[in-house]
Amino acid sequence: MSPELISILVLAVVFVIATTRSINMGALAFAAAFAVGTLVADLDADGIFAGFPGDLFVVLVGVTYLFAIARSNGTTDWLVHASVRLVRGRVALIPWVMFALTGALTAIGAVSPAAVAIVAPIALSFAARYGISPLLMGAMVVHGAQGGGFSPISIYGSIVNGIVEREKLPGNEVTLFLASLIVNLVIAAVVFVACGGLRLWRQGSVTEADEGALKGRGELRDQPQPTGAGTTTDPGTHPSPTTTATATRDVGVEVDEVPGLVRQPAPRDTTATATREATPAPTSSLPLTPPRIATLLSLVALVVAVLVLDLDAGLTAITLAVVLSAIWPDDSRKAVGEIAWPTVLLICGVLTYVGVLDEMGTITWAGEGVGGIGVPLLAAVLLCYIGAIVSAFASSVGIMGALIPLAVPFLAQGEIGAVGMVAALAVSATVVDVSPFSTNGALVLAAAPDVDRERFFRQLMVYGGIVVAVVPAVVWLLMVVPGWG
C-alpha cells in the first residue's frame, strides 16, 4: 500500500474514532500526524510541525480574547442595539448587511479570514441577542467574504489571475468575480430561507419591548458553553439580573455525535429550561463608558491595522486585548478563560495533519491521479471535488495554486473552456470555507456567544458537508460543461 493511500485511510480512521469515542479530533490528529509523519513519511519533528497553523492559532486566540472583553464590558450590547436602530428595527436586514460588509471588505483587498475575524463576532453577538440562527448569520458572513473575494483588486482575485497568466491560459477577471459573487449570493439566499429568514421578515420592525419575546427564537439557544475542563461558562454574561425562560428547540440538522468535542445527543422538539440574561436596557441607557469607548476604538484600530497597514489580525487583536486588560482588569478578568480552547485544539490538530499530507505529497498525488484520466469532463469535476474537500481543511489559496496548473494538460486539448474551468475551481475551493475546519468557519465557531457550541459545531460541519457535496457538481455543470472561454 502506498504511503499516500495510508495517510488518507488514517485520516478516515481519525474521523471514525472522534465520532464514536468522543475524543477531541484535534488531539487525535496530532497523534496521527506524529505516527504517519514519523513511520510512513520519515519526517522529523520540524517536518511535522511545518503544517502547524501558527497564524490561525493566534487569530483564533486574539480575536476571541478581544471580543470576550467586549462582551464583558457591554460593548457588544451597545453595538447590536445601534445596529437595530441603524436599520430602523428591521432585524431581517442585518444578515444581509453583514453579507455586504464582509463582501465589500474582501473586494477592496482584505484577506477573507481578516474580514471574517472583524465582522463575525459582531454579527454573531447580534444573532444571540435577537434570536437569529447563528448558522444563518455565520453563513452570511462567510459567503459574503467569498462573494467579494475574487474582484480584480482582491487578494484571491489577484492570485488566481496571476496563476492563469503564468500558465498562459485564457482568463477573464470580470467573469471570475461575477461567478463567485453570484454563486455565494444564491447560496446565501437559500440559507436565509432555510434558517428562518422569512420568519424574520414577517416579524417586521423590532422595538425594545419586543426584545424579550424575540430572544431565544433562533435555531440555537443561549446555553452555557462547554469548556475544556468539563465545566460550563456563559461568555456573554456580565453582572446583570437573570431570568429563567423555557424554550422549545427545533434544530433541522442532528447527528448522534460531535467529532472532536463531547458526546451530547440533541433531541428534536424537546423542551429545555435555560437561564438567560435579562433583556438589556435600550441603547439610550447603555452609556458610552470609558471601557466601552476604548473597546470601540480598539475595534476601529483592528480594522485599520488589518486593512490599511496590512498588519496581522491575530497579533493586533491580542495586543489590543492585553492593553484593555491592563487598564480595566476587572472587566477582562475572565476573558482568557472564555477563549474557545477546545476549538483551537481541534482546528490546529486537524490542520497539522493536513500539513503532513502536503509534506509527503498526498494532495499532489491525488490531483495528478485525477489529471491523468482520459475523459476531460470527468477529470474536471473530480478536480473540483478535490479542491472542495481539501480546501475544507486547508488553505484555499494553496489548493487553487496546486489544482489550476494540474488542469493545464487537458485544458490544452481544447475540449474544455479555460475560463469556466478556472472559475469552477476557484468557487469550489473557496465556497466550502463555511466548514468549521477552515479558517473562516473556525472563526465563526469561536466567535459565537451564548450558544450550545457542540450543536453549532455539528451544524457547521453538516452544512459544510452539504456544500462540499453539492456546489462542485453545480458549478461544473453551469461553468465547465457549457465550455466558458
Image: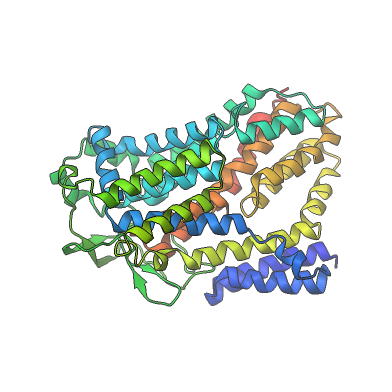
Report whether residue 312 is seen.
Answer: yes
Where residue 135 appears, x then y in whole percent?
42, 50
Compare residues 26 and 245 and report the one nearer the observer. 26
Figure disc tally:
0
Q: Where's the C terminus, which quadrant?
A: top right
Where residue 335 appears, x then y in whole percent?
38, 63
In percent of the image, x 63 and y 41: which residue is there?
A: 428
Q: Is residue 207 above or below residue 289?
A: above
In which quadrant of the rendered view does residue 20 lie? bottom right
Report whether residue 189 is seen.
Answer: no
In percent of the image, x 69 and y 22: which residue is there?
A: 172
In which quadrant of the rendered view does residue 250 lie? bottom left
Q: Is residue 177 above or below residue 432?
A: above
In which quadrant of the rendered view does residue 32 lie? bottom right
Is 39 on the left-hand or right-hand side of 314? right
**Colour mapping:** rainbow
Q: Residue furthest left?
A: 209
Q: Is residue 245 above or below residue 96?
A: below
In percent of the image, x 62 and y 22: which residue is there?
A: 174
Where residue 279 appears, x then y in whole percent?
18, 54
Q: Residue furthest front?
A: 327
Q: Where's the N terminus, which quadrant?
A: bottom right
Where residue 61 appears, x then y in whole percent?
49, 59
